[in-house]
Amino acid sequence: MGALPAAVGLGACAQWRALVSGHPIIAEGWGLRPELVAPIIESPRRMVVMVPTPEFRRHQLRELPRAASLGHRVSDPVRAQANRLARDHLVAEDAVRAARRLGIRVIEVDGSRDAAAMAEIVADHFSPYLSRRHHET
């Protein structure tokens, strides 16, 4: 499968409309709102929304230095990280509500499954749209 770099909002959706590909495209990014993507896909079944649980997000911050990085200096790193977690939680909750309202499947990432198991869940979801050739590569 091809992959696009993380993209945000309406500009990204407009760019996707211009794509012509015989292959499935995977796009990710916190700014890819279900309500922005849904109008450019053939069916809600052609999309999934994956969101981390708050517990998994805290786990990421503890275990992955890049996840804990604020990217810039702040006067109160503890408060900045707490604000970031709160923002991430609000964005995730809103994405889940929008996806469910639009009939788009939501997959929660809680750390109980490894990457291979998560990939299998996503592959199973999209299997009706993947030719055998795409599914095996």
Image: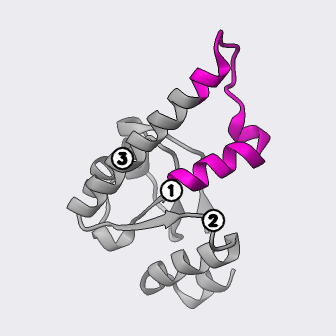
Of callouts 2 and 3, the N-terminal one: 3
Residue 74 vs residue 116, the one in the foreground: 74
Lateral position of residue 118 relative to residue 72, left or right? left
Of callouts 1 and 2, the N-terminal one: 1
Asked if residue 130 is among those painted magenta in the image, a careful observer would answer no
Residue holding disc 3: 33
Q: Select label 1 or label 3 by which is in front.
A: 1
Residue at (68% x, 70% y) in the render: 115
Residue 125, located in which quarter of the rendered image?
A: bottom left
| Residue 71 visible in the snapshot | yes
Estimate how packed mark 1 is, as few (under 14), some (14 to 19) or many (20 or more) residues with alpha carbons within 10 Å.
some
Q: Select label 2 or label 3 by which is in front.
A: 2
Q: Where 47 sits versus 69, above or below?
A: below
Residue holding disc 2: 111
Residue holding disc 1: 53
Tag 3: amino acid: Arg
Distance Cα–Cα, label 2 vs label 3: 23 Å
Distance Cα–Cα, label 1 vs label 2: 9 Å
Q: Which residues are magenta?
A: 52-81
Asked if residue 78 is among those painted magenta in the image, a careful observer would answer yes
Q: Main secondary structure of the magenta part?
A: helix
**Circles 1 and 3: CB atoms closer than 8 Å:** no
Q: Secondary structure at mark 3?
A: loop
Query: Where in the figure is residue 76, as x and y percent of width and height?
Result: 64, 14
**Circles 1 and 2: CB atoms closer than 8 Å:** yes
Q: Where 86 sits versus 116, above or below?
A: above
Residue at (70% x, 14% y) in the render: 73
Q: Secondary structure at mark 1?
A: loop
Query: Where in the figure is residue 14, as x and y percent of width and height?
Result: 36, 42
